[in-house]
Image (spheres, helix red, strand yellow):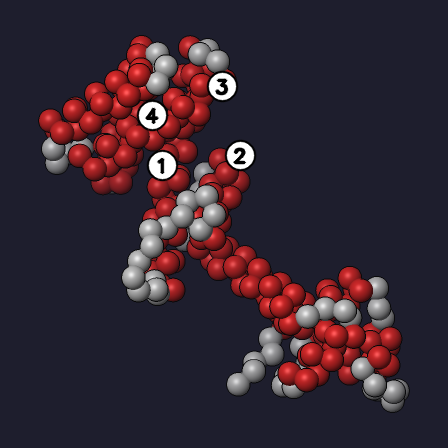
Amino acid sequence: MFIFTKEMAAILRQIREKAGLSQREVALRMGIKSKSGRSFIAQLESGRIKNPTLRTIFDYLHTCGASFREFFAKLETIDFQTKHKQLIAKVNLPEGKAKKKIERDVAWFEAGIKYPRKITQKPLSTEKQEEMSVEFAKYRIKIEKIESEVHKLLCDFAPGTFYFPFYKDCARAFYSALVKYYGKAPKKLDQKLTEIVKLGVKNGLKENILLKIKEKVISVFKSQVGTDKN
C-alpha cells in the first residue's frame, strides 16, 4: 500500500518551485481545468490529500519535469537527516567546532563514505546499524579529545603542518592499542605501543615527538576510563 506522507508532499512543492511553476499552471498541465484545480494542488502539496494515486504523483512529477527517481532520492535524503538527528540526540556531543566535526564524521559513517563498514554475509538490521553508529559517535567524541590535545602538542614542537596528519594517525593507533590491551595484557600493550613508535620513526617521524604523543594519549585515555567508570 502506498502511504503518502507530509514529507512527500513537501518534496512535491519543492520540485514545483524549482520548475518555476505555479499551482494553477501545474493543475492545468495535469488536465485539471476546473476552478478547484489550484485548490487540489495546494491540498496535495500540504499533505491534506491522504491517499493520492501513484498516477496522480506521476502526472505531477512529469508536469514539473521530474521523475520518481528524483522524488525518492529527495525522500531518502530527508529520511537520512531525520535518523541522523535522532542518533545524535542519543550522545553527548561537545560544543564548538568539535561538535560539527563529529556530526560530519558520524554522518559519513552512517552513509559508509569515509568509514566503510566491514562486509557481512547477512544484511545488518536497522537496530544493529543504529547501535554501530552510536558506538562510532562515542568513539569519535573520545578520539576528538585526544586529537585536540595532540594538535596542541604538535603546535608546541612545530614539526611542520605537513606531518600533523601522520602524527595524528599514530595517536589513533596508540588509542586503539590502549582500547584493546589496557588492563588486559600489559606486556602486549607495551609491545604494541613500541611498535607504533618504531614504525613512525621508520616513516620519517621524530621519536621524541612520538613519545610525547604516546604519553599524552595514555594520559587522556586513563582520564576517559575513569570518567566511564564513574
Q: Quadrant of residue 198?
A: top left
Picture coordinates of residue 202, whole percent (x, y)? 31, 16
Indicate whether 52 appears above or below 131: below
Left/right placement of residue 91 relative to residue 67 reads left
Q: Which of label 4 and label 1 is nearer to you?
A: 4
Badge 1: residue crowd in 10 Å (few <14, some 14–19, many ≥20): some
Q: Name the residue under label 4.
A: 170
Tell me whether circle 1 and circle 3 mark residues in contact (CB < 8 Å): no
Q: How far apart are marks 2 and 1 (CA)?
A: 15 Å
Which circle marks residue 124 in the picture? Answer: none
Label 2 amino acid?
Lys
Question: Looking at the image, which residue is at 60% across and 64% down?
Answer: 73
Indicate whether 119 appears above or below 166: below
Q: How far apart are marks 3 and 2 (CA)?
A: 21 Å
| Residue placed most toward the observer, 30 or 226 | 30
Tell me whether circle 3 and circle 4 mark residues in contact (CB < 8 Å): no
Picture coordinates of residue 205, whole percent (x, y)? 36, 15
Label 1 amino acid?
Lys
Could you tell which of marks 3 and 2 lies nearer the N-terminus? Answer: 2
Badge 3: residue crowd in 10 Å (few <14, some 14–19, many ≥20): few
Q: Distance between the residues labelled 4 and 2?
A: 23 Å
Q: Mark 1 points at which residue?
A: 142
Label 4 amino acid?
Cys
Which circle marks residue 162 in the picture? Answer: 3
